[in-house]
Image (cartoon, rainbow, N blue to C red):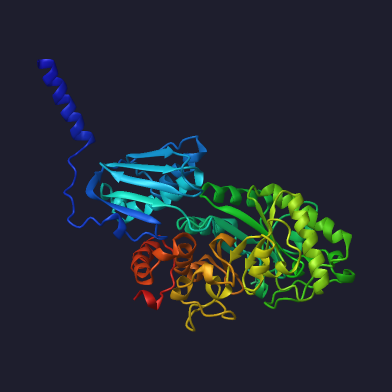
Amino acid sequence: MFLSRLASLLLLASLCTCAPAPPPQPVDVPKLSELPLIPLPATISDGDEVSYYETYSGEMTPSSDATIGDAQRYLSERMPSLILPLQYTTSDRFAEGAYRIDFADGQIEIQAGEREGMLNAVKTLEQVLHFSGADAGAVYIAGGTIDDQPRFPYRGYMLDVARHFFPADTVKQVIDRIAAYKINHLHLHLSDDQGWRIEIKGYPRLTEVGAATEVDGTPGGFYTQEEYRDLVEYAMHKGITVIPEIDMPGHTNAALAAYPILNVEGAEVEPYIGTKVGFSTFDVDQDSVYTFIDDVVEQLAALTPGPYFHLGGDESNATDHEDYVRFVNEVQQIVRSHGKSPIGWDEVATSELAEGTIVQLWAHSEYALRAKEAGNPVLMSPATRTYLDMQYDTASRIGLHWAAYIPLDSAYLWDPATQAEGITDGDILGIEAPLWSETVRTLEDIDYLTFPRLLALAEVGWTPQERREWEDFRRRLRAQVGWLETQGVGVYESRVLE
Ligand code: ACM
């Protein structure tokens, strides 16, 4: 009797230290479907109950199981020292990237089929926790279930590191920002007329000469192979596949300045610091050009575990069309021989598309049908909707407007499935938002043009078309913008948010 009383007192004492009474429940706990989640999940079912979730502060050791380890690491990095009653369950009934989160009885259960689904789940969970006040400690969260999967498997962001170079640390900060919105591909535009940005063993002048410049003549830079490998791995842990692009046969002045042998008649050229396009070309008749490309693709393929290699192919105005077709046909085979699927800007659809070559639509929507007829997927980057270097409006401090001004609503109010004649969801791999960097010099500049438009594009790529609604997006975006600002992400003050 005495012993059991003592035991229950001890138990009570221990309960008192570990589990203080929950704070009173606020009257206005939002339903799951009212939270400002972006991208909006495919399905949110509200439950009847609100639960108290006891949180702890401390270190969490991620599982060595890669399926959930990266998700656990992601959440603990984003919400340091917050530990929750959270259970991860793997199930094979989920499609790629899909997941489910159940909130009930003070327990959160995440289910997904694989690593990407788990990562997507914790990215949603972070938003649920943040907007439920978990950053401040204990939380009440409305019960219910989020059952979600992406509309398109590929949601991309492109950073032009050629026109202006961005050091690896800046790229990591960009990765952190875009990963939170379930962007799962980062396309690095690694070469152009103004700069060559990746170390290639055996070709030292690419970086000694080709990397020395950038637009306006400021010093450029490049990634060593070690830095590039580290970036790829950093991105991978956050659910992002890196795609290297070497643009060719045009947009190659930096390579030609480094190695004139690649140029027509071996002509020497000066480094270029302007912003014109369409004036350079590899000599497509020379064996040494293909040897060079084979070496570059081989090294980049070995450094890049993802399935893609981007061969550029745009604006090759200095290459005869017949030569262009022959060149693109050949380079597709080189890329495939190194185990990668080629991606090319939409002009590559005028060549003979190899099996699996992805056509990235940017300016010529009529080429989408050629891709489809060849049985090849289309990646949607219409310049008038997705080009983040386009100015928002005439007051934008940086950016260009040759394709369009793209205010926030214009970035949101379009449907990839009605963008090109004869092309529907099944033909589309996904969407990508490119940031060309002629006017972009710093992380502040990147933020200014990227946010908040990337959130609109992230939702275009993720959320079913029939679920997307402008006024509701605007409501959710206002809350997200406030959060981005507290994280130090500079956001363009779009009038449509007022
Ligand atoms: C491009 O904007 N030249 C692909």
Query: What residue do we see at 74% from left, 64% from top?
Result: 210
Identity of the residue furthest to the left in this view: 1
From the viewer's perspective, tell me whether residue 223 is left or right of residue 123: right
From the viewer's perspective, tell me whether residue 124 is left or right of residue 290: left
Identity of the residue furthest to the bottom in this view: 394
Image quadrant occupied by the C terminus: bottom left
Instruction: Give the tally of numbered discs.
Output: 0
Residue closer to the observer: 320 or 252: 320
Query: What residue do we see at 61% from left, 60% from top?
Result: 187
Residue closer to the observer: 156 or 202: 156
Residue 83 sits in quarter? top left
From the viewer's perspective, tell me whether residue 488 is left or right of residue 10: right
Where residue 332 sits in the image (x, y, percent)?
75, 58
Where residue 331 sits in the image (x, y, percent)?
77, 59
Residue closer to the observer: 31 or 178: 31
Residue closer to the observer: 315 or 20: 315
Does 473 sit above or below residue 294? below
Where residue 343 sits in the image (x, y, percent)?
67, 60
Residue 345 sits in quarter? bottom right
Does 194 sit above or below residue 121? below
Identity of the residue furthest to the right in this view: 265
Q: In which quadrant of this rendering is ligand 1 seen?
A: bottom right
Camera sees residue 258? no
Camera sees residue 183? yes
Residue 459 sits in quarter? bottom left
Where residue 407 sits in the image (x, y, percent)?
46, 77
Image quadrant occupied by the N terminus: top left
